[in-house]
């Protein structure tokens, strides 16, 4: 039997023993029970900033989307009922958001991965602050650039979309 | 699997067992993820998307008895998103479950699974969605899912009057014995054509009544008969 196989067998046995012991003791690698906020039941518990973030991420495409991506986006934006000029301005804002959001995540993950490799931990607080600021700035920009009717329709739509969102309690609680 | 990884997993197992024997919790994880599901249509295709976005906080309680020296460096988290379309009684299926890249447990995840398929108006498709984050050491650290029925609903209207501002008022006129599952008695259109076909997405959730979502798709036609039955 090779060393690999023996280590694997002993590891499996130890995990099995741990599982058996875990029936009467606290597990070592414990994942807190996930409390899910179901937006279809409690949309009021999904915060506006989270709803806008998820909606922007869902609908945004790169500045040069593929044909399929562009059709999907048009169908998604079509549900909002924006007039043509508003729809165009909305898609343009989303393209900028798409790039900025991806860049934020890329930078944070590079730093977090390097820290993790060195046995250090990353504090996501600053990243989440920057993330939410980005979402808020796009939101404010849309409020200023869309027609009054267009902004009203968009806001109403995003509020309604909370019904399609689910969040960990820590993510969505206000 | 490389020998180094095997060794690390082995050492991790030893610590897990040792700490459990003491009734302590060496590592805890608080997920902070969201899942958002979207479906829409352009009148021909149905587009479905499922997005998972967020991160989590892993806490290593090294000071607890038996918890010192655990190498949590081997832990990695992988997002998985389900977007699966099927039909009752068989027929083609679309999509499935896709996995994102494995990241460090502190990393941020934003991963989606998009599907599209040509849909027959009036036919209901089952849309199963789900989002999970899987830890290679601790198993599923976050997971949620759902199920809805989606279909393209078509309502046919015929011209009633042309209004002074150039808009046109249409009245529902479904060909033959067809009935609309969405749509209203009247429709205010932008073009004074003989017929207007309005496409909507009908979404059925559980046992509740369907929701009809306008998608801003209207086709105006001038030649009788009306091109589509209502669905």
Image (cartoon, helix red, strand yellow):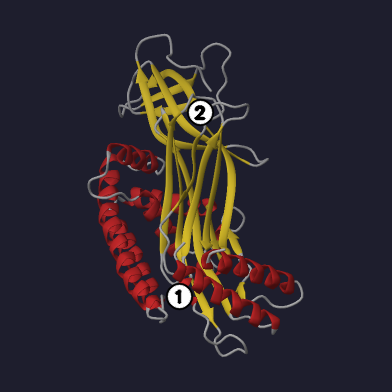
Question: Where does the image place residue A100, in percent across and percent down from the top left?
Answer: 27, 62
3D distance between C-alphas at marks 2 and 1: 52 Å
Subunit bearing disc 2:
B
Q: Which residue lies furthest to the top in this view?
A: B224
Q: Are marks 2 and 1 on the same chain?
A: yes
Residue at image point 59% right, 81% down: B26
Can you tell which quarter of the image residue B63 is in?
bottom right
The answer to whether A56 appears left or right of A4 in the picture is left
Q: Residue furthest right?
A: A24
Question: Where does the image place residue B131, in percent across and percent down from the top left?
Answer: 52, 54
Residue at image point 34% right, 48% down: A150
Residue linked to disc 1: B73
Q: Is residue B223 visible?
A: yes
Residue at image point 45% right, 20% down: B157
How packed mark 1 is, by other alpha carbons closer than 10 Å (few <14, some 14-19, many 20 or more), is some
In the image, A114 versus B166, the foreground residue is A114
Q: Earlier in the sequence, mark 2 or mark 1?
A: 1
In the image, A28 versus B106, the foreground residue is A28
The disc at residue B153 is 2
How packed mark 2 is, by other alpha carbons closer than 10 Å (few <14, some 14-19, many 20 or more), is many
Question: Where does the image place residue B178, in percent across and percent down from the top left?
Answer: 56, 17
Question: Where does the image place residue B169, in percent across and percent down from the top left?
Answer: 41, 24
Q: From what the image shows, is residue A123 above or below residue B164? A: below
In the image, A48 versus B109, the foreground residue is B109
Report the number of discs: 2
Q: What element carries label 1?
A: helix
In the image, A25 versus B57, the foreground residue is A25
Q: Is mark 2 on a helix, strand or loop?
A: strand
Q: Can residue B138 be seen in this view?
A: no
Front tag of 2 and 1: 1
């Amino acid at each position: 039997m090779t060393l690999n196989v023996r280590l694997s067998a002993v590891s499996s046995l130890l995990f099995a023993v741990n599982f058996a012991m875990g029936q009467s003791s606290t597990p070592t690698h414990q994942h807190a029970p996930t409390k899910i906020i179901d937006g279809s039941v409690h949309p009021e518990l999904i915060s506006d900033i989270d709803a806008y973030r998820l909606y922007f991420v869902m609908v945004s495409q790169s500045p040069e989307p593929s044909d399929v991506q562009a059709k999907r986006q048009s169908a998604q934006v079509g549900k909002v009922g924006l007039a043509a000029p508003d729809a165009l301005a909305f898609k343009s804002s989303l393209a900028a958001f798409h790039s900025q959001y991806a860049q934020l995540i890329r930078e944070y993950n590079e730093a977090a991965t390097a820290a993790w490799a060195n046995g250090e931990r990353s504090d996501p607080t600053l990243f989440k602050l920057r993330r939410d600021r980005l979402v808020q700035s796009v939101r404010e920009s849309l409020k200023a650039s869309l027609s009054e009717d267009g902004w009203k329709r968009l806001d109403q739509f995003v509020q309604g979309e909370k019904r399609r969102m689910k969040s960990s309690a820590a993510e969505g609680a206000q | 699997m490389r020998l180094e990884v095997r060794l690390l997993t082995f050492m991790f197992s030893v610590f897990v067992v040792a700490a459990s024997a003491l009734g302590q919790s060496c590592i805890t994880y608080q997920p902070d993820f969201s899942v958002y599901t979207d479906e829409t249509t352009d009148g021909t295709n149905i587009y479905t998307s499922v997005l998972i976005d967020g991160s989590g906080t892993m806490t290593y309680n090294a000071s607890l008895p038996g918890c010192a020296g655990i190498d949590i460096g081997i832990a990695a988290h992988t997002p998985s998103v389900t977007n699966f379309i099927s039909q009752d009684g068989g027929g083609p299926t679309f999509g499935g479950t896709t996995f994102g890249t494995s990241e460090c447990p502190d990393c941020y995840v934003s991963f989606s699974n998009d599907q599209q398929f040509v849909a027959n108006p009036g036919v209901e498709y089952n849309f199963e969605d789900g989002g999970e984050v899987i830890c290679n050491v601790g198993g599923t650290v976050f997971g949620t899912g759902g199920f809805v029925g989606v279909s393209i609903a078509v309502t046919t209207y015929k011209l009633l009057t042309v209004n002074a501002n150039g808009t046109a008022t249409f009245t529902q006129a479904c060909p033959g014995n067809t009935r609309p599952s969405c749509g209203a008695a009247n429709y205010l259109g932008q073009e004074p054509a003989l017929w207007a076909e309005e496409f909507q997405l009908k979404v059925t959730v559980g046992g509740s009544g369907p929701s009809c979502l306008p998608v801003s798709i209207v086709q105006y036609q001038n030649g009788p008969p009306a091109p589509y039955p209502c669905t």
